[in-house]
Image (cartoon, grey):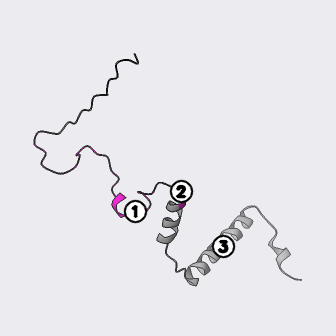
């Protein structure tokens, strides 16, 4: 078996009427050309590119809205479990 070395056969099929460049059967994601993290091999480079792509401006209005929504949901949850809300009020 080790005496005769054979190479694997490659099949380079091209459709008869295809006149484009590249392989028409190549599976590629729709947005890969716009992503910066797809071509990188190591994890550190992917992570640093992803962090650079994130928008750096966070508005205080967004944080305020999220806190209001969380507060409302907490009070609804406490109401559903029949929690006594009178402990928050002074007599």
Residue 32 left/right relative to 88: left
Which residue is nearer to you in this view: 80 or 21? 21
Q: Quadrant of residue 44?
A: bottom right
Q: Residue at horizontal 73%, vertical 67%?
A: 79
The residue under label 2 is 43
Whichever of callouts 1 and 2 sits on the residue coming sooner in the sequence is: 1
Viewer-nearest of labels 1 and 3? Answer: 1
- Indicate the position of residue 84 as horizontal and vertical percent values: 82, 69
**For the N terminus, which image quadrant?**
top left
Whichever of callouts 1 and 3 sits on the residue coming sooner in the sequence is: 1
Q: Residues within 10 Å of mark 1 (few under 14, many from 20)?
A: few
Q: Residues within 10 Å of mark 2 (few under 14, many from 20)?
A: few
Which residue is nearer to you in this view: 70 or 17? 17
| Image: 54 above or below 22 | below
The residue under label 1 is 35
Q: Residue at horizontal 53%, vertical 56%?
A: 43
Viewer-nearest of labels 3 and 2? Answer: 2
- Indicate the position of residue 36 as horizontal and vertical percent values: 41, 63
Viewer-nearest of labels 1 and 2? Answer: 2
Whichever of callouts 3 and 2 sits on the residue coming sooner in the sequence is: 2
Contact, CB < 8 Å: mark 1 with mark 2?
Answer: no
For the residues labelled 1 and 3, the Cα–Cα distance comes to 37 Å
For the residues labelled 1 and 2, the Cα–Cα distance comes to 15 Å
Residue 38 left/right relative to 24: right
The residue under label 3 is 72
């Amino acid at each position: 078996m080790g005496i005769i070395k054979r190479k694997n056969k490659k099949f380079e099929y091209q459709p008869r009427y295809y006149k484009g460049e590249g392989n028409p059967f190549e599976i590629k994601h729709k947005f890969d050309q716009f992503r910066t993290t797809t071509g990188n091999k190591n994890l550190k480079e992917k992570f640093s590119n992803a962090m650079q792509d994130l928008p750096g401006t966070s508005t205080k209005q967004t944080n305020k809205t999220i806190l209001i929504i969380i507060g409302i949901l907490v009070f609804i949850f406490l109401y559903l479990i029949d929690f006594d809300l009178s402990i928050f009020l002074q007599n």
